[in-house]
Image (cartoon, rainbow, N blue to C red):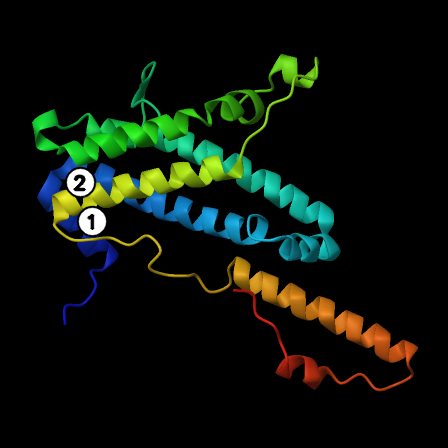
């Protein structure tokens, strides 16, 4: 059985296959997308599953989770924008997936990659209005004249899914193997938080009920019947 590559070995492998500049660029994009993918997993677990989770967050700390929801959403949109924007802006160069693609002749990339690339850019462009008018800038019409603008969480999910398909296709094309972005679930993530909040809420409810009914509070029974979110 072959062992997994270390971080340094993976970077060296990419440089060996792609050359120094393209290898380092892809390595950077790979790490950036892994983090983007994981951030969205947390966002989805907290805010896109079902009403019971929203109710739990509102009971625990409504303003904090409202703030977290907004900060995470804006960060995801900006992250997608940075990942897919043009390589050059005035005199500055950006490390983007578009810049990586443009470093190859079209006959070096197959039709499937280019199709996924164009689909990803289209998905990202759908988020540009929110990025330009609510995140990167304060649009006058929105903030002064009460013009409304909205964003669908599922548009963000679709864009990240399209980028995942592109990154998988690129990895497979150049390195002749598959890469799974959902290969791990970090310890101490959104699911851990939800389970701790649920346990704390049920503990409080049980304690208050025991006080009202003048009976002992048995915390061990809660541990034995702890519910887990899935």
Q: Residues within 10 Å of mark 1 (few under 14, many from 20)?
A: some
Is 213 situated left or right of 16 in this image? right
Q: Residue at x 28, y 54 (%)?
A: 180
Question: Along the polypeptide, which appears first: circle 1 or circle 2?
Answer: 1
Is 24 situated left or right of 141 in this image? left
Instruction: Using the image, tell me which numbered label, if any, was put on residue 43.
Output: none
For label 1, the SS is: helix
Front in this rendered view, residue 55 or 7:
55
105 vs 193: above or below: above
Measure the alpha-carbon separation of dots 1 and 2. 7 Å
Give how far across and how far down residue 137 sits, in percent: 56, 20
Front in this rendered view, residue 199 or 87:
199
**Image quadrant in which the N terminus is located:** bottom left
Is 227 situated left or right of 36 in this image? right
Residue at the disc numbered 1: 11
Give how far across and how far down residue 182 sits, in percent: 35, 55
Q: Residue at x 14, y 50 (%)?
A: 13
Viewer can see residue 109: yes
Give how far across and how far down residue 99 sits, in percent: 25, 27
Q: Residue at x 59, y 61 (%)?
A: 193
Give how far across and how far down residue 53 sits, in percent: 63, 56
Is 153 situated left or right of 102 in this image? right
Asked whether disc 1 touches disc 2, contact meaning CB atoms under 8 Å apart, the reply is yes
Query: Residue furthest toward the left?
Result: 107
Viewer can see residue 28: no
Residue at the disc numbered 2: 23
For label 2, the SS is: helix
């Amino acid at each position: 059985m072959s062992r997994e590559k270390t971080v340094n070995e993976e970077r060296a492998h990419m440089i060996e296959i792609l050359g120094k500049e393209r290898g380092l660029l892809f390595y950077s994009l790979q790490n950036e997308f892994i983090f983007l993918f994981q951030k969205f997993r947390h966002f989805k677990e907290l805010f896109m599953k079902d009403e019971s989770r929203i109710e739990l967050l509102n009971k625990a700390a409504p303003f904090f989770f409202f703030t977290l929801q907004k900060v995470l959403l804006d960060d995801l949109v900006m992250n997608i924008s940075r990942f897919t924007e043009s390589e050059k802006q005035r005199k500055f160069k950006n490390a983007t997936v578009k810049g990586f693609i443009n470093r190859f002749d079209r006959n070096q990339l197959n039709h499937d990659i280019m199709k996924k690339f164009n689909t990803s850019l289209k998905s990202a462009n759908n988020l540009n209005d929110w990025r330009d008018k609510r995140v990167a800038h304060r649009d006058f019409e929105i903030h002064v004249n009460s013009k409304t603008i909205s964003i669908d969480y599922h548009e963000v999910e679709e864009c990240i899914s399209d980028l995942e398909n592109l990154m998988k296709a690129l990895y497979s094309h150049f390195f002749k193997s598959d890469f799974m972005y959902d290969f791990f679930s970090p310890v101490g993530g959104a699911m851990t938080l939800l389970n701790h909040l649920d346990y704390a809420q049920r503990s409080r409810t049980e304690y208050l009920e025991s006080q009202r009914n003048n009976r002992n509070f048995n915390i061990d029974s809660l541990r034995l019947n702890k519910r887990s979110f899935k």
